[in-house]
Image: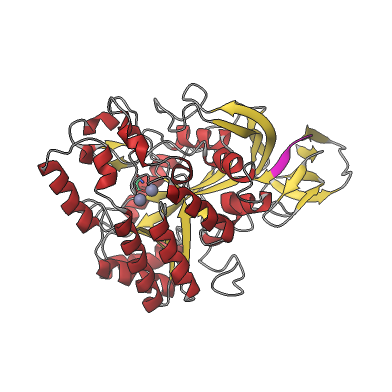
């Protein structure tokens, strides 16, 4: 049935205006004043913003990691995402050395099909480069619509790839029209520091942070950017946690190298002191890269405001405190890395960013939705509100005040990293391709209704006036 959203304030990455939005057959058919409501369901958005649905470019649902599997899967994870205002995710398909890439892609299709409640795509991990991998890449792009490749520069002996693999991936990506993503930390140096800390009897969660200093995130980021310049390719640095890494991205962009940077809510709001919480509670805050000293937060906010960082990913990779995080009791290096974030990404950025005057409303939309849609080949189908695009819409009350807690969240884990934090603003209703997934703060979606997103090649869905702008 046709729907018309009335009385709301539409906000895109560039404009803010009052108008009605008419939705037919899953797409926005018309935007204008006083649209006819004949034969239409009317949705009253009085007092609310009408945002494009969030695009989360960084999730790990049901991911095998650290001797366990991340708890939220494509069903619970996407339901939580929808509650939080996100209508598209891009998850990381993890590959295995020596095995065809397609095997891993098939595993990820099996995990997600018939489970996701919002639309989803995949990035593909590249752990090795050889003729077999090179031969498979064209079909990964053309058949699967996977147009971004992820290289881990950390997690030695597990996910880490060497520099040659990264460089060859950058060269291949340039040829094929893909965006290379890096987890930028120096895994070899971390490996040394971790072994040394454990040998010295330093086993508590705080040593996770102390063995991953920000200098080596900066070093790896700079190295990846240098390779990108040499290969004349394109790079997206995930989960930038600190000033050292953000500076490397800004320097590379100043030189005209095509480098983009993503940060995550945890690095904007939480800090290293959380890892010192007693009774092993610090384990809840173990991410890689780690939480940093608090002063980095201002640097990251400023980088978002000035466009030196462009997106925010959740890096959703959730583990229960009891039964999963506690695998690392007595040895911090065995704590599964990651946390629950998919649900709070949108509201944290709004509350801490817009409400606190750090970014504008239009910047918020760009960071939470539009820019990721552009960089990852989903725009304009996703990432904006305009006639002809998917009706992925968030009706958002910017005034409601609430407290984040594990009791109220919908992620499948036993803690929330922002427990007790007060935020302003909440999604009231969320539509995916014109159908309610969340209606008046209740889940009304259908498990399995999410569609797989084949994505366009890098650079084809936005006009680059210069390497540094969209
Ligand atoms: N970030 C993190 O700690 N866990 C998820 C895997 C990754 O992104 O490195
Ligand atoms: Zn990572
Ligand atoms: Zn991640």
Q: Residue furthest front?
A: 295
Residue 284 at least partly seen = yes
**What x and y, as percent, mark residue 50?**
71, 42
Is 418 located above or below residue 456 in the figure?
A: above
Q: Which residue occupies 48% across, 63% down?
A: 260
Residue 378 at least partly seen = no
Q: Residue furthest top?
A: 407
As for residue 454 lying within the magenta part, the answer is no
The quarter of the image holding the C terminus is bottom right
Would residue 176 appear left or right of 69 to someone viewing this image?
Answer: right
Is 112 located above or below residue 409 in the figure?
A: below
Question: Which of the pair 120/400 is nearer the observer?
Answer: 400
Question: Which of the pair 421/385 is nearer the observer?
Answer: 421
**What x and y, as percent, mark residue 117?**
54, 37
**What x and y, as percent, mark residue 145?**
48, 59
State which region is magenta.
Answer: 46-50
**What x and y, as percent, mark residue 273?**
36, 38
Q: Which residue occupies 34% across, 29% down?
A: 320
Question: Which of the pair 416/279 is nearer the observer?
Answer: 279
- What secondary structure predominates along the stretch shown in magenta? loop
Would residue 46 appear left or right of 71 to someone viewing this image?
Answer: right
């Amino acid at each position: 049935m046709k729907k018309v959203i009335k009385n709301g304030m539409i906000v895109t990455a560039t404009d803010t205006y009052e108008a009605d939005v008419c939705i037919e057959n899953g797409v926005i058919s018309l935007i204008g004043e006083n649209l006819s409501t004949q034969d239409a369901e009317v949705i009253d958005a009085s007092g609310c913003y009408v945002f494009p649905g969030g695009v989360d470019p960084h999730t790990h649902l049901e991911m095998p990691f650290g001797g366990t599997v991340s708890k939220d899967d494509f069903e619970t994870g996407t339901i939580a995402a929808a509650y939080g205002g996100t209508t598209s995710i891009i998850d990381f398909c993890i590959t295995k050395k020596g095995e065809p890439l397609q095997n891993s892609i098939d595993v990820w299709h099996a995990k997600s099909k018939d489970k996701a409640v919002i639309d989803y795509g995949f990035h593909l991990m590249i752990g090795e480069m050889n003729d077999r991998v090179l031969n498979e890449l064209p079909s990964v792009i053309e058949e699967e619509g996977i147009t971004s490749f992820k290289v881990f520069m950390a997690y030695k002996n597990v996910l880490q790839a060497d520099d040659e693999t990264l460089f060859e991936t950058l060269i291949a990506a340039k040829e094929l029209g893909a965006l290379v993503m890096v987890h930028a930390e120096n895994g070899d140096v971390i490996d040394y520091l971790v072994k040394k800390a454990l040998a010295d009897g330093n086993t508590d969660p705080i040593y996770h942070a102390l063995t991953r200093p920000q200098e080596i995130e900066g070093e790896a980021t700079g190295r990846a950017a240098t390779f990108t310049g040499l290969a004349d390719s394109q790079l997206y640095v995930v989960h930038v946690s600190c000033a050292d890494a953000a500076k490397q991205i800004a320097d590379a962009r100043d030189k005209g190298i095509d480098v983009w940077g993503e940060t995550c809510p945890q690095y904007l709001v939480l800090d290293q002191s959380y890892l010192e919480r007693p009774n092993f509670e610090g384990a809840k805050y173990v991410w890689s890269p780690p939480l940093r000293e608090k002063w980095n937060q201002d640097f990251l906010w400023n980088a978002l405001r000035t466009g030196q960082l462009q997106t925010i990913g959740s890096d959703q990779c959730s583990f229960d405190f009891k039964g999963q995080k506690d695998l690392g009791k007595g040895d911090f290096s065995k704590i599964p890395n990651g946390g629950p974030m998919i649900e709070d990404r949108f509201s944290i950025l709004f509350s801490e960013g817009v409400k606190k005057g750090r970014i504008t409303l239009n910047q918020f939309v760009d960071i939470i939705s539009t820019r990721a849609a552009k960089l990852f080949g989903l725009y304009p189908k996703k990432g904006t509100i305009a006639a002809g695009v998917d009706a992925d819409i968030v009706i958002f009350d910017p005034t409601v005040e609430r407290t984040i807690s594990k009791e109220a969240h919908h992620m499948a884990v036993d803690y929330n990293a922002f427990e007790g934090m007060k935020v302003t603003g909440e999604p009231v209703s969320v539509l995916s391709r014109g159908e309610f997934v969340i209606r008046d703060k209740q889940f009304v979606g259908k498990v399995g209704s999410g569609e797989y997103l084949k994505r366009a090649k890098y650079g084809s869905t936005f006009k680059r006036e210069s390497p540094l702008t969209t």
